[in-house]
Image: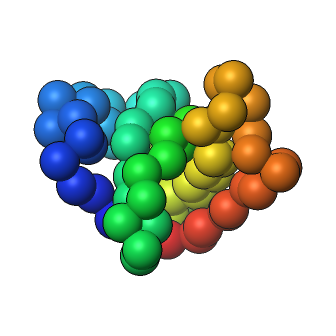
Amino acid sequence: MFQGPGTSRAELDRMRRTLSNGRDFNGHIINYRKCGEAYVVEWHVAPLCDESGSVTHWVSVQRDVTRSGRPNNDQTSTVLA
């Protein structure tokens, strides 16, 4: 996934602020495929914490919701960071 001219800097900044506070993030953003085609992503990112409450990892689920606000062909990508 790539960002481009239609990608909201404000939404990326909101995500960064939310995650910096160790909170879940939910949002939509325009990303771009390698071929340059734009698509809308519904994004959910959640922290995973250890026993002491410190964030150790993040789970991110992203869905292509370009068509009618629904996942496009049920394409869901899950990334553990």
Residue 77 in picture, x, y percent from top left: 68, 62
* Residue with the most extreme top position: 68
Decide if residue 20 is in sight here. Answer: no
Residue 59 picture quarter: bottom right
Decide if residue 2 is in sight here. Answer: yes
Q: Is residue 64 left or right of residue 53?
A: right
Residue 63 in picture, x, y percent from top left: 65, 46
Judging depth in this view, the residue of 27 and 17 nearest the camera is: 27
Q: Residue at x 67, y 62 (%)?
A: 78
Q: Is residue 39 left or right of residue 71?
A: left
Residue 9 picture quarter: top left
Name the colour scheme: rainbow
Q: Residue at x 50, y 40 (%)?
A: 40
Q: Residue at x 26, y 43 (%)?
A: 7
Judging depth in this view, the residue of 13 and 39 nearest the camera is: 39
Judging depth in this view, the residue of 61 and 17 nearest the camera is: 61
Residue 39 in picture, x, y percent from top left: 49, 47
Residue 68 lies, with reference to residue 57, above or below; the image says above
Q: Residue at x 31, y 37 (%)?
A: 15
* Residue with the most extreme right position: 74
Q: Quadrant of the N terminus?
A: bottom left
Residue 26 lies, with reference to residue 72, above or below; the image says above
Residue 2 lies, with reference to residue 9, above or below; the image says below
Q: Is residue 65 left or right of residue 21?
A: right
